[in-house]
Image (cartoon, grey):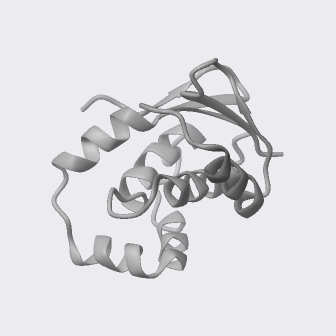
Amino acid sequence: METSVELLNDESVVFNYTTFLSASCKKRVTLVDALKTLIPAFEISWSSSMPNGMSGSEKLQLQALKVLSTSVSDTNNIIRLLRLARAEHIDELIIRLPYALDEEQLSEIETRACTKIIQLDADGEELRAHLL
């Protein structure tokens, strides 16, 4: 399976949201997936089930496939993704999107994820979040 996460350098991780959406469409929905959609706090329990010895970007990849869902909004998925990345001590997350988010979505993400989002390209399809 193509990965949706790559390590850019020691501090930056790239998350390809397009690849995630593609992989999610191929995944079978389980009862746990339904619970995650209904109870966002359920995502926290996944952190303790991650194998030792994995890098933060590898853990983020696994957790994203378990926690993010195509049945919730892109805004909520990105907020969850940023929280997961922060929990893995990732300093900077670059998110590649298949389309730009509007200003209202970006503002909500910044507020709820407690981070500043910077658009890296003119199309708004690549975002940078500093998670320190």
Q: Where is residue 98, by image quadrant?
A: top left
Q: Position of residue 113 (x, y in %)?
A: 71, 58
Q: Position of residue 3 (x, y in %)?
A: 36, 31
Say which residue appears at 16% left-offset and 59% top-offset. 28
Which quadrant: the C terminus?
top right
Say which residue appears at 63% left-offset and 18% top-offset. 122
Q: Position of residue 15 (x, y in %)?
A: 51, 34
Compared across the picture, whether 51 is left or right of 106 comes to left
Q: Nearer the viewer, residue 74 or 54?
A: 74
Query: Is 41 drawn above or below residue 62 in the view shown?
Result: below
Say which residue appears at 68% left-offset and 58% top-offset. 108
Q: Nearer the viewer, residue 34 or 103?
A: 103
Say which residue appears at 49% left-offset and 56% top-offset. 77
Query: Is 84 drawn above or below residue 31 in the view shown?
Result: above
Q: Nearer the viewer, residue 77 or 56?
A: 77
Q: Nearer the viewer, residue 72 or 23?
A: 72
Compared across the picture, whether 73 is left or right of 14 comes to left
Q: Position of residue 30 (x, y in %)?
A: 21, 71
Q: Where is residue 63, by image quadrant?
A: bottom left
Compared across the picture, whether 113 is left or right of 66 comes to right
